[in-house]
């Protein structure tokens, strides 16, 4: 039997429905389009096109992986984030569209700092793929950034992503346990830290639990370990007039806000995600 784009799509969709994958048709389309390098229009208009035996086997291998709940973009090896193409590794969290919201929230502050100082120096703690920092650098050409991560593989991937997107002249990735190896001060300190309670991690969807690194998920017994560390040390690395932005769990606005307020910060803005839930807090130091 000859394989076509349409027949492979139907096969993938059926397998994914059988595996109880929620967005079966969407995942099938994204997976096959990515593997065969097909733009969206081509996928729709070239459905009867014959697929080579070699490519069909690649698609079927990928279908098997997705049916076993490996995320689509893990299989493809990269994901779009704020107009950038970012590679991923086992050491990095998969960048997600909701994290673009903190980028949007920070851009006006970065632009204001550039207007006042001529530059804006950013650090992204627990940078992973480099997504947040690189997105800010792409939006604010005068900005420079550092991405820090405890995982050496993440540091390597973040630097590779900077090069891939032409941002490596303004970005440096460093290995550090939060602020431990960081020197200097920054106009913006940003982080999407692990914030899931340890007892919850095992109950997460397999796409997350089995494929995102535990280091990027497990926030300790109450989910607040990383916030305590960041709040305790951020002021010493924050330039005058600078701000801190941290992503949070949907129900952590009050508790994380109070934690930072206890260290002398005040909330200046909140960022909501695509579903209208609290996604990030932006804070300044002092009055």
Image: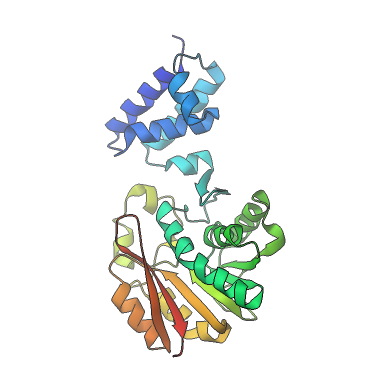
Image location of residue 168, percent across then percent down: 69, 58
Nearer the observer, 131 or 173: 131
Residue furthest out toward the top: 1
> Compared to 271, does 38 lie above or below?
above
Q: Nearer the viewer, residue 235 or 77?
A: 235
- Residue, x 35% and y 48% (percent of image)? 206
As displayed, is residue 122 above or below residue 231?
above
Which residue is rendered at x = 53% and y = 27% of the image? 36
Q: Looking at the image, can residue 175 be seen?
A: yes
Q: Quadrant of the N terminus?
A: top left
What is the quadrant of residue 8 in the picture?
Answer: top left
Left of 97 or right of it: where is 20? left
Could you tell me residue 176's position as x and y percent? Answer: 59, 72
Left or right side of 237 for 49 = left
- Image location (x, y in percent) of residue 25: 34, 31
Residue 69 in which image quadrant: top left
Looking at the image, how many numbered discs can be counted on the residues?
A: 0
User: Which residue lies most toward the right here?
Assistant: 169
Looking at the rendered image, the quarter that the C terminus falls into is: bottom left
The reply to whether residue 177 is visible in this rendering is no
Q: Out of 220 and 274, give the one closest to the viewer.
A: 274
Q: Is residue 165 above or below residue 147?
A: above
Image point (45%, 33%), residue name? 31
């Amino acid at each position: 039997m000859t394989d076509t784009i349409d027949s492979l799509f139907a096969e993938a969709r059926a397998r994914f429905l059988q595996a109880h994958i929620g967005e079966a048709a969407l995942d099938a389309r994204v997976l096959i389009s990515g593997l065969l390098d097909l733009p969206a229009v081509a996928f729709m208009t070239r459905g009867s096109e014959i697929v080579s035996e070699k490519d069909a086997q690649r698609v079927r291998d990928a279908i098997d992986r997705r049916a076993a709940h490996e995320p689509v973009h893990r299989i493809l090896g990269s994901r779009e984030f704020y107009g950038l193409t970012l590679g991923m590794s086992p050491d990095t969290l998969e960048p997600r569209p909701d994290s673009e919201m903190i980028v949007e929230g920070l851009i006006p502050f970065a632009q204001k700092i550039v207007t006042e100082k001529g530059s804006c120096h950013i650090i992204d703690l627990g940078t992973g793929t480099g997504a947040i920092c690189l997105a800010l650098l792409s939006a604010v050409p005068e900005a420079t950034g550092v991405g820090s991560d405890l995982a050496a593989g993440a540091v390597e991937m973040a630097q590779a992503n900077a090069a891939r997107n032409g941002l490596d002249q303004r970005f440096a990735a460093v290995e550090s346990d939060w602020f431990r190896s960081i020197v200097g001060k920054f106009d913006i300190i940003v982080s999407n830290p692990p914030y899931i309670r340890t007892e919850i991690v095992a109950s997460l969807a397999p796409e997350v639990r089995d494929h995102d690194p535990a280091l990027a998920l497990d926030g300790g017994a109450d989910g607040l370990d990383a916030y305590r560390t960041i709040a305790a040390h951020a002021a010493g690395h924050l330039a005058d007039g600078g701000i801190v932005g941290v992503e949070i769990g949907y129900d952590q606005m009050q508790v994380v806000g109070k934690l930072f307020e206890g260290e002398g910060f005040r909330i200046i803005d909140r960022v909501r995600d695509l579903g209208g839930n609290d996604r990030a807090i932006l804070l300044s130091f002092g009055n």
